[in-house]
Amino acid sequence: ALVGAVATLLALAAGAAAAPPRADTIYYGGEVWTGDPSQPTAQAIAVKGNRILYVGSNMGAARYWGPRTRLVDLRGRRVVPGFIDAHIHASMAVQLVYSVDLYGLGALDKYLAAVAEFAAAHPDLPAIRGSGWSNTVVPGIGPLASDLDSVVSDRPVALYSEDYHSLWVNSRALELAGIDGSTPDPVGGKIERLPGSVSPENPYGIPSGTLRENATDLVLDALPDYTVDQYRHGLRYFQRHVAGPLGITGVFDPLLRIGGNAVEAYQQLADEGLLTVRVRGALALNPEDDLATWLPAAEAERAKHTRALFQTNAVKFFADGVVEGHTAWLKQPYADAEEYAGDPNYAGVALWDDEALADAFTAVDAAGFQIHVHAIGDAATTQVLDALAAARQRNGAHDWRPGITHLQLVDPADYDRFAELGVTAVPQPYWFVKDDYYTYLQVPYLGLPRADYEYPMKSFFDRGVLVASASDFPVTIPPDPLDAIQTGVMRWFPGLVYEYPAPPSLEGVLWPEERVTVRQMLRSFTRNAARACFTDDVCGTLAAGKSADFVVLSRDILRCPPQDIGTARVLMTVFRGKVVYRD
Ligand SMILES: [Zn+2]
């Protein structure tokens, strides 16, 4: 049949003298899912320059053939729009290049061995950074400075937990940051202290070596940032080894700093034509920032980044922390509140007060910034929706597309408010599993049945909420959208769920009622994510006039059994008409 199609294509092309524009490349003979409701399926894509000239039948594409047109036989493969990750810290890939990697090591002695080895291999680094230790390995107050001191004591060491909400440091780092027994917990943060030394008054207790949430800034602010060159290197590593092979052509980088080296690195790559992903970024605003000085600085930063491929038009807020750090803000107390906090009513921490949050949303929205908020606990999400409603009331309704990301626990009474307020839900489907976090942290900290109602998804789709999926890389490594699509469909993933029987048993499936379809998951990584990033005018679907951003897959994920979706590979990634990855 394919040979016939080629013959027909060439025959028609030869006779198509009147066809005006000539394609640079015609991809034909594929199974194209366009994401465009007016024409959901196609066989061929004709590309000229950066853009799509035509999407449709093989015969229709032939009209765009010219003597210099390259023909690419898709051999019946599934083609989808380039994946867009609506919350991915691409610039933090620098940490994969210049830091010690603890992901998956799973034991304290292995963490220490990796740190010792890295420090020995990098004698010139003024500080040792890293990430990837797990709260499941060292629950409670977390890992100790004294353990790190035994392997590195001459330089500061600062190691993020795999969720990036805790920092494990050595004594040199505590010293550099001036943290000791007289240092109180900062607002929205916690300095873990040795058991038995803790007191409500000064001295508050001996810092044990783990810092949570805002307390991590005490050390991070005292360490030198990566240089612009290191960020460039990290971004190029990300493009080549992460985005290209995974079919990612668009990213929303949610945590950039005004005047930081990361934004400068992005801008340089954009100026030099070296970006192979379309980047939208958010500038972080914290409760302690003074809006009167922060906002003009953010506007000045935004004005510097106006290239098609790199803009910083959003502002990132944190409404709370994470369940595994006991810092997510919940409507009901933690199941282990008494044990953890000595207070049976302990329900986590609000990082903003209601009025301040509403004022900040109103101000950044009035200045034309998009709002993007981290909310994990149900109380946090309600507060954010209330503050968004207040901002809309004051500024008037307009096309603002605010996003709330993570959404681990959501009060069902809030689902409809997302749609009413035009708020995008930005979940991480990779986390929709009964993995070790569920077993060792979420069940004990949240209790049952609450831990079984994490991460709603279908509820959002059913109510017409815009859902844009994301990885939160480097929290999720690798940020493979095909894994996320499978997980969104099954809410189970082979290798991650150990303690329960495999499907069709529902025992190991996290909240089976929230499973969604492959097409819904695909939309969440393409059309919806483009809309969430305000890039839907140029990408997110395959249609004439749009940027030629698409992915060729090794398996037909719309027809294979759901448990095989994650085994599909990206064979080719095309970004703005150029092949940026080929298997
Ligand atoms: Zn994040």
Image: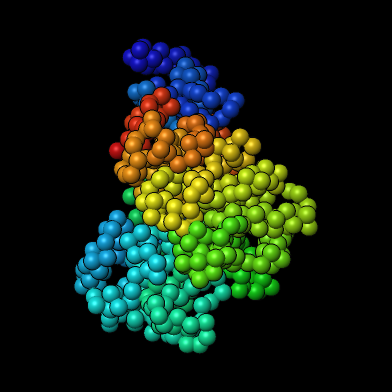
Residue 295, above or below 490 = below
> Split into 4 quadrants, where in the image is the C terminus?
top left
Q: Residue at x 41, y 50 (%)?
A: 438
Using the image as rendered, state which of residue 427 and residue 241 is in the foreground: 427
Residue 416 in sight here: yes
Residue 570 at x, y = what percent? 35, 37
Q: Coloured how? A: rainbow
Q: Residue at x 48, y 23 (%)?
A: 42
Residue 342, above or below 468 = below
Give the total number of marks visible in the rendering: 0
Residue 472, above or below 569 = below
Residue 78 in sight here: no
Residue 345 at x, y = what percent? 58, 65
Using the image as rendered, state which of residue 252 and residue 184 is in the foreground: 184
Location of residue 219 by image quarter: bottom left
Residue 23, above or below 304 = above
212 with respect to 564 (left or right): right
> Split into 4 quadrants, where in the image is the N terminus?
top left
422 with respect to 506 (left or right): right
Using the image as rendered, state which of residue 50 and residue 103 is in the foreground: 103
532 with respect to 451 (left or right): right
Q: Residue at x 54, y 55 (%)?
A: 376
154 with respect to 563 (left or right): left
Residue 13 at x, y = what percent? 44, 17
Residue 507 at x, y = what percent? 40, 38
Q: Residue at x 43, y 67 (%)?
A: 166
